Amino acid sequence: DASLPLVVSTWRFKDATAAAWEALQSGGSVLDAVERGCGRCEADQCDGSVGYGGSPDETGETSLDALIINGDTMEVGAVADLRRVKNAIGVARAVMEHTHHTLLVGESASVFAEDMGFPAEDLTTNTSMDIFTRWLKGSCQPNYRKNVTPDPTTSCGPYRPGAATRPGTAQTHSRRPQHTDIRAHDTIGIIAISENGHVAAGTSTNGATHKIPGRVGDSPIAGAGAYADSSAGAAAATGDGDIMMRFLPSFLAVELMRSGFDPSVACKVAVSRTKKHYPQFFGAVICANTTGHYGAACNKLPGFSQFDFMVFTSETRTPSLQT
Ligand code: SD4
C-alpha cells in the first residue's frame, strides 16, 4: 500500500488534501503542495480551527500560527501570533524564502507580511465574536490562567482577563481546558512526498480558544507541530499544543523512522512519550517515510478513540479517509 507521490494530512480536510495533491500533479513542488493545502484550509476556515474567524483569545482577537519545512535543505519558515493577515502559511513560506530567519512573531510578523504584500484584514467574524462574548458572560468555561478569582456568588464568572491571584491567596477555580470537543481543535498538518523523494511538511492553525494573548502553540515550532527530513520522512501533530510542544513529537517520529521504525509505530511512540506525563492529553500524530509508508496515532480518550486523517496517492485517486 506504499506509493509515491503521497500527501497525508490531519483530520478530514478533504479539499485541502486534494488541493495539495493537485499542486503536485500540476508540476508543483512538495512545498507548493503544503502551502496550497494549508492555504486552502485557511481560506475555508476548516472546522473554525484554521484561518480567520476562529479561536478568539482572551481579548477576542484571532491570531494565527503556521510552519513550513523543506526536508531537502532543512530550511524552515514560520509565523506565530500573526495578526490581521489571513494567509499564515503564505507568510511562513515568505519567511523561509525571503529572510535568513526561521520564526517571526506577533505584530512584527504582521508588519513583515504587509511589507511582503499580504493584505491586512480583520480576522474577527460574527462567529468569533459570538464565541468570545459567550465566554465573557460565563467564565465557568475553561480558561488558561491558573488561580483565577471566582465571583463569590456564583463561584464562576464573569471572567475578567488578568484577574489572577497569587497562589494561596484564593481558592482556585480555573479549569484547564479539556479538549473533549475534538471538532473544535483541528489544526491542519500536511506531509507531502514527491515521487523522487523530496519531502516537505507544514501546519496552519488559529490555536487555542480563549488563549492568553501572546500564546504560541506547537504548530509553528519545528519538531513540534511538524518536521521533515528528506533522508527519513516527515511528521505533523495536532492537539493540545501547550502540552505537546514540550515533547517534540514530530521530531521524535521522524527520528524513529530514520532508525527503521515503521511509521505507525513511530507515531505511536511519539504519542506515548507525551502520554507518559500527561495521560489525558488530547492529540494525534501523522507520519510518513520516504518509501511512501504512512501511519498515525492518537491518545485514545473517552470521546476520542479514533483519529481521522486523509491520504492521497495515485492509488487512492481521491483524498481517502483513514482512521
Ligand atoms: C495548538 N496544536 O495551537 C494546536 C491546536 C490543534 O488540533 O492542533 N488542535 O495547540
Image (cartoon, rainbow, N blue to C red):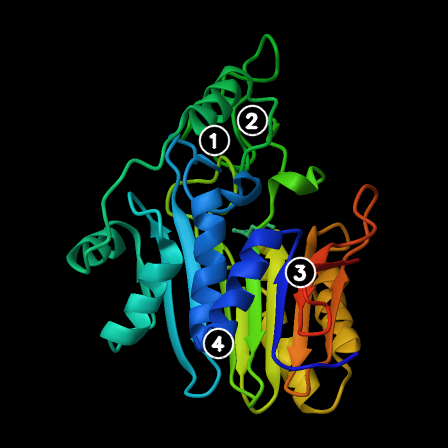
Cα–Cα gap, marks 2 and 1: 7 Å
Q: CA distance from mark 1 to mark 3?
A: 49 Å
Of the pair 4 and 225, the residue shown nearer to us:
4
Q: Amino acid at mark 4?
A: Val
Name which of mark 1 and mark 4 comes first in the sequence. 4
Whether the residues at callouts 1 and 4 have beta carbons within 8 Å, the answer is no
Left or right, 201 with respect to 99, comes to: right
The amino acid type of the residue labelled 1 equals Thr
Tell me the kind of residue under disc 2.
Ala
Which residue sits at x=55%, y=67%?
A: 21
> Secondary structure beneath disc 4?
helix
Residue sitting at x 43%, y 84%: 74
In 3D space, how far apart are the residues under numbered discs 1 and 4 (Cα atoms)? 49 Å
Q: Position of residue 260 (x, y in %)?
A: 74, 91
Residue under label 1, please give it. 165
Residue identified by numbered label 3: 319
Q: Which residue is mark 4?
A: 30
Dot in front, 1 or 4: 4
Residue at the disc numbered 2: 170
Which quarter of the figure has residue 160?
top left
Examine the rendering and report whether any part of residue 188 can be seen. yes
Residue kind at label 3, given as amino acid type: Pro
Point out residue 315 in the picture as x, y percentages from the top left corner: 73, 73
Q: Nearer the viewer, mark 3 or mark 2?
A: 3
| Of callouts 1 and 3, the N-terminal one | 1
Outermost residue to the left? 115
Mark 4 or 2: in front is 4
